[in-house]
């Protein structure tokens, strides 16, 4: 088994782990070595449990003490497990879904995606972009024993391929109304079950007690996590919000002069704002106020740790019901000429978005054009920066460096957007020298990063600039 710390989570595993567990097994699950796997990016954990007295209180305690897992709990009545299994498949939108009754997950299964191996009672469903199942893989006997023979709940399918390991059946194709069972030795029994199913109406298949995608009590859910910070404040009544379309994630440090200017600027670009104050001493935390500010949190700063700050923001946003989130720094502003963020968010074909950024140089009217950059999408001083990503539940950026790491937690269906950020942080020479010296103190190999634009901040050399207003929409596309 792999060491947990060696697993890369800067990707989207896009998997639902469905577990049939007792109270004892779920306690074993959260206390064992499996826990790091349950927190991998894009992994949701659906737990099926037979309903009994006091189970709701017990599971509430599990959720609130382990809020950084993408939980879904389904309670089923005695002898109705198969209904709950189908409810689990229909509830998840993940590309893969597999089942086990073991309170353990092999980490190697995730590294190599060998989902059909070892101890799993495996059912894996692959889905299209609309969430419809397009293929289903089962071990021999699982189809009738687990899904159909005892279930009154229809499984919503588009086209299904069932693969068995015995009975000389290599492939059984089903389409339309789930016919063509002639190759299966229990075909008549299966047909009879299918004919009695109403595929236009989903019957009860167990109670979905909790779903991480439908947050209902953000304050209570985040309370355990927020206890580690010296100050935090929910700035609005969350009950009036519902689901957020887009949430902006902001980290600040001693920005009292600019913080409310930034918050006001973001009003047209998001539905909610989460603010992390990195230990400001000038009153930034207290001054930050805006109608769309959901929560502000202040941490204790020992050294600047950009990676830690972004991952804290990712943890914070996971407590809220949202579709998209994006990172923005306090010294950045969108160019209003290219305000199309909600149009970009409406595109169902993309999951990760790059904004484009220019470094203002000596004035607000000009930007530096000859800055080298390691991103292949960057050109002529217009730099592509991955900032926005679709909600896949709680996720993290994994890196061994506190600087120069991926700026989104995963890459899946990426695209560059015609959204332009103007960076004010190095507009003046004094600011450039200060930032150059700071980055040099943080990274001893800083000067060797020829592909990083900060490698030339402190040098008094000739450079090329261009008028900001000359940038056209065609250049950003």
Image (cartoon, rainbow, N blue to C red):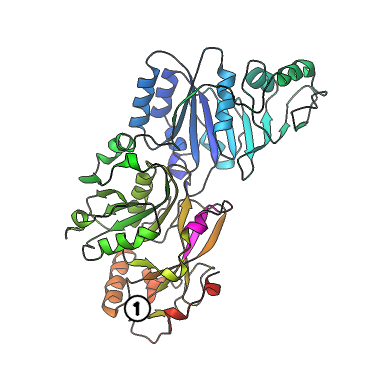
SS for tag 1?
loop
**Front residue (pair 262, 95):** 262
Q: Is residue 445 visible?
A: no
Q: Looking at the image, which residue sits at the far bottom? A: 462
Circle 1 packing at 10 Å, graded few (<14), some (14-19), many (20+), is some
Tell me which segment is drawn in magenta.
342-355
Where's residue 77, x and y in %? Answer: 51, 15
Tag 1 residue: 364
144 with respect to 291 (left or right): right
Assign the C terminus to one quadrant of the image: bottom right
Horizontally, is 143 left or right of 413 in the view?
right
Relative height, residue 453 to residue 134 (above, below): below
Q: Residue 303: percent from the left, percent from the top? A: 25, 57
Q: Residue at x 23, y 45 (%)?
A: 232
Q: Is residue 351 magenta?
A: yes
Q: How many marks?
A: 1
Q: Where 166 sits versus 311, above or below?
A: above
Residue 456 horizontal side relative to residue 122, left or right: left
**Does the image show residue 402?**
yes
Q: Position of residue 183 (x, y in %)?
A: 82, 24
x 49%, y 36%: residue? 44
> Vertically, is 106 above or below 304?
above
Residue nearer the viewer, 21 or 201: 201
Q: Nearer the viewer, residue 120 or 443?
A: 120
Q: Is residue 198 magenta?
A: no
Residue at the outermost left position:
282
């Amino acid at each position: 088994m792999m060491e947990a710390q060696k697993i890369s989570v800067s990707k989207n595993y896009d998997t639902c782990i469905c577990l049939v567990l007792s109270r004892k097994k779920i306690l074993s699950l959260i206390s064992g070595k499996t826990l790091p796997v349950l927190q991998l990016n894009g992994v949701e954990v659906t737990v099926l449990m037979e309903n009994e007295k006091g189970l709701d209180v017990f599971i509430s305690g599990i959720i609130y003490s382990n809020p950084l897992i993408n939980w879904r709990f389904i309670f089923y009545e005695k002898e109705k497990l198969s209904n709950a299994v189908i409810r689990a498949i229909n509830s998840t939108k993940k590309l893969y879904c597999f089942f086990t009754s073991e309170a353990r997950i092999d980490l190697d299964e995730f590294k190599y995606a060998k989902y059909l191996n070892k101890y799993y009672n495996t059912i894996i469903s692959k889905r299209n972009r609309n969430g419809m199942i397009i293929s289903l893989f089962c071990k021999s006997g699982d189809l009738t024993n687990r899904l159909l023979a005892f279930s009154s709940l229809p499984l919503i399918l588009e086209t299904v391929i069932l693969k068995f390991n015995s009975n000389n059946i290599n492939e059984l194709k089903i389409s339309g109304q789930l016919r063509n069972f002639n190759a299966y030795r229990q075909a008549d029994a299966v047909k009879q079950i299918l004919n009695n199913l109403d595929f236009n109406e989903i019957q009860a298949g167990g109670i979905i007690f909790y779903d991480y995608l439908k947050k209902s009590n953000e304050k209570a859910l985040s309370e355990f996590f927020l206890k580690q910070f010296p100050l935090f404040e929910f700035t609005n009544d969350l009950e009036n919000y519902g689901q957020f379309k887009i949430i902006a994630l902001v980290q600040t440090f001693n920005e009292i002069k600019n913080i409310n200017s930034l918050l006001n600027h973001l009003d047209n670009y998001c539905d909610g704002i989460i603010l992390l104050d990195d230990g400001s001493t000038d009153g930034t935390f207290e001054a930050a106020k805006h109608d769309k500010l959901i929560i502000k949190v202040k941490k204790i700063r020992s050294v600047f740790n950009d990676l830690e700050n972004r991952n804290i923001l990712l943890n914070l946003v996971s407590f809220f019901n949202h579709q998209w989130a994006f990172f923005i720094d306090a010294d950045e502003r969108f160019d209003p000429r290219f305000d199309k963020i909600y149009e970009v968010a409406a595109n169902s074909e993309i999951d990760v978005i790059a904004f484009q950024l220019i470094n203002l140089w000596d004035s607000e009217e000009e930007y530096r054009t000859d800055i080298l950059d390691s991103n292949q999408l960057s050109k002529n001083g217009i730099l592509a920066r991955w900032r926005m990503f679709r909600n896949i539940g709680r996720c993290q950026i994994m890196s061994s460096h506190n600087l120069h790491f991926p700026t989104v937690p995963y890459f899946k269906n990426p695209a560059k957007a015609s959204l332009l950020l103007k960076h004010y942080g190095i507009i003046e020479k004094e600011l450039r020298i200060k930032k150059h010296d700071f980055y040099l103190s943080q990274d001893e190999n800083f000067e060797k990063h020829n592909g990083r634009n900060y490698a030339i901040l402190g040098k008094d050399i000739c450079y090329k600039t261009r008028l900001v207003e000359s940038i056209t929409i065609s250049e950003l596309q």
